[in-house]
Amino acid sequence: MRKQKPKYKQIIDAAVRVIAENGYHKSQVSKIASEAGVADGTIYLYFKNKEDILVSVFKEKMGQFIEQIVQSTNKKHNAKEKLYTLIEMHFQQLANDHHLAIVTQLELRQSKKSLRLDINHVLKPYLTVIDRIVDEGIEEQLFRPDLNRPLVRQMIFGTLDEVVTNWVMKDQKYDLMNQVSSVHELIVNGISFKK
């Protein structure tokens, strides 16, 4: 499998840097190869084309991230704590890697429809984690039982996504992690039983 090949991760990491700095459309495969320290032809041993590189970047980074989210949320005692952890980890991953933040929040949005569909497919396991947390919150009677689950999922993911996009658009001039508590409180207040 290509992920086990030694230069795969090198190319993925180089692609994140090159695409973040130059934009997807101006990022030639030769630039990515040069940044990765490999010959142009080596790229094609791992990827079909530049589009495949972008989808693979997202798959690789998102796959690792989802595993970490599942492990961390499983250690929490209830759905509110799990939701806080999910928000915190979502923001932390992108705050820690500004190149990845630029690629996921800006460059992926400018790609063509077929590529965006591939990326939506990669996102499904993450959305499933959100669904699971909401379902647990309903079972624990922390969240209202009448919630429209697909709408709540869109609201949670959309909020996190927009907060990070706004941070990227403002050139990351403020601490994204300072937003975690406020975002958590707003979401939880929206889906909890009214007091």
Image (cartoon, rainbow, N blue to C red):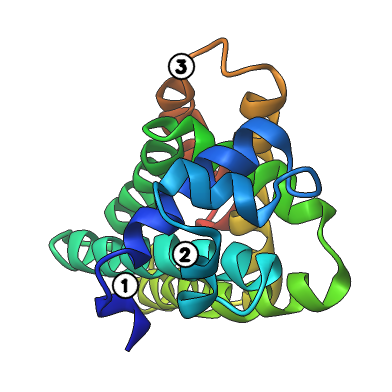
Can you identify the residue that label 3 sits on?
175
Q: Residue at x 81, y 60 (%)?
A: 111
Q: Secondary structure at mark 2?
A: loop
Label 2 close to label 3 by CB (< 8 Å) = no
As drawn, is 154 to the left or to the right of 64? right
Disc 2: which residue: 143
Q: Which mark is residue 140?
A: 1
Q: Is residue 172 left or right of residue 185?
A: right
- Whole-percent x and y of residue 141? 38, 70
Crowding around mark 3 (Cα neighbors within 10 Å: few <14, some 14 to 19, many 20+) is few
- Per the image, label 3 sits on a secondary structure element best described as loop
Q: Amino acid at mark 2?
A: Phe
Residue 192 appears in the picture as rendered: yes
In what element is the residue under mark 1? loop
Please report the residue visible at 56 percent of the width from the left and 72 percent of the height from the top.
123
At label 1, the amino acid type is: Glu
- From what the image shows, is residue 183 above or below residue 137? above
Q: Position of residue 14 (x, y in %)?
A: 46, 46
Q: Residue drawn at (75%, 78%), measured in percent from left and top?
A: 117
